[in-house]
Image (cartoon, grey):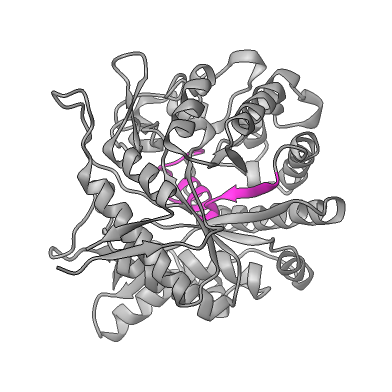
Amino acid sequence: MYKEFIKFPKDFKFGVSTASFQIEGGALEDGKGKSIWDEFSSHKNNIADGCNGEITCDHFHKWDIDLDIMKSLGIKNYRFSIAWTRIFPTGKIESYNEKGMLFYENLIKEMLKRGITPYVTLFHWDLPLELQKKGGFDNKQTIEDFLSYSKTVIDRLSPLVKNWMTFNEPWVFSFCGHLFGNHAPGLKDLKTALAVTHNILLAHAKTVEYVKNNYSDLEIGIVNNLEQIVSASDKEEDIQAAKRWNLAFNSWYLDPLFKGEYPKELVQYYTNHLDENNNIENVMIEYSDEEMKFIQKNCGDFLGINYYTRRIIAFDSENYHLQAKHIFRPTIKRSNFESWEVNPEAFYDLLIDVKKQYGDIKIYISESGTCGDDFIGEDGCVHDEYRIEYLRRHFAAVQQAIVDGVNIKGYFVWSLLDNFEWGFGFTKRFGIVFTDYEDNQNRIIKDSGHFLSHVIRKNGFIID
């Protein structure tokens, strides 16, 4: 039988990821203000199980337990996000809340005591509600508000934190929240989604510029969710639909950073977009060459890639946005989250494509993981062999990409904990640690957590 020990470079960083709204709870404690997700999840019809983010995993009170679990597993790198509304409850600098800052400062100090290196995300979708009332990221003033927030946090925490990420998955925030309406703030307008995207890229670039002008020992980047996109057939209409999907999902967020432009073909498509009555509408936003050059100049030190699935795309004349739809092959294994494919080969192909298109950029796999119907067995344990197999194969895909020249420096598993999975509430479990929502949010390390611990200690694993 074939067996091979898959070994990673000595400086490779294995870790885990979480997000503030998904795990913290403590929704209004110690002066925290409301975010758009506090508001969105307060309406039960928005969330699959009618739950909200008031308690979630109760990390706000159980953070020491979570850090001790990481230490016990040998996890030395932790990517987490800061809730803007804990620092500035209204989103504005004049609402500064020292108690919120102290929560994160203490959390990070305790991480460091346990040998855990923090990787901080500044924005993981929980925009202050008061800023959304003024237009949110459709309003350019929010760029300046984000910069004020970022400066305050970075200036205070930079002695402790050397690795920063500005925005998590701008596509999800922009389109799920402003076109599809299934994420906060629940809007449905294509032009607004495009404007939010552009303003987020500008806010990212301004934050990078600030860091580069004031610190020599910090690294900062952005996190994009990317997918390998393939055509459903050799039909020209399917090929073109897949091309549009790839341009809108991947290139629209990478080209500005590394090429200083939006994809010209998609700019033309949005300029002559067909509305739901097949009338031409111009939904393309206005922007300047100077803005695009500024974004490219301040793209950051690295790119975070969140990878979950490949998408097979076919033409669909009924689809308002791209005249395209996602289809499935019954022969391909899928997770129970939106029927995502489990496809590590596509992960490898995506990483190779990123290098081909954008050069030798430094990359972190900032999220990758899978979910299933995990439960506590009769032995009191949680056996998630499917997740171990997922991680084994996806780790192997990353290692092969490294061997083939892609500059990947780390892999952060999504997620440390089962948590509040946005519009799905608590119905989806991604954690390597089980959260028992029926028993005081108690934690149980799953088999996959022990597997990750083994991989970290050996800096590799056997694959067969």
Residue at 82%, 52% (x, y): give it. Answer: 210
Q: Nearer the viewer, residue 360 or 34?
A: 360
Above or below, 61 relative to 458:
above
**Looking at the rendering, which quadrant does residue 450 occupy?**
top left
For the question of whether residue 318 can be seen, the reply is no
Percent x, y of residue 82: 61, 34
**Looking at the rendering, which quadrant does residue 244 occupy?**
bottom left
**Looking at the rendering, which quadrant does residue 181 occupy?**
top left
Above or below, 372 relative to 335:
above
Percent x, y of residue 394: 34, 59
Percent x, y of residue 38: 51, 26
Indicate whether residue 178 is drawn in magenta. Answer: yes
Left or right: 166 as drawn, with respect to 408? right
Left or right: 300 as drawn, with respect to 405? right
Above or below, 71 relative to 2:
above
Left or right: 243 as drawn, with respect to 105? left
Residue at 63%, 63% (x, y): give it. Answer: 285
For the question of whether residue 156 can be seen, the reply is yes
Report the label total. 0
Percent x, y of residue 21: 51, 31
Indicate whether residue 30 is drawn in magenta. Answer: no
* Magenta residues (range): 162-185
Q: Nearer the viewer, residue 166 or 345?
A: 345
Q: Nearer the viewer, residue 426 or 113?
A: 113
Q: Residue furthest right?
A: 214
Residue at 63%, 20% (x, y): give it. Answer: 32
Which quadrant, please, contains the N terminus?
bottom left
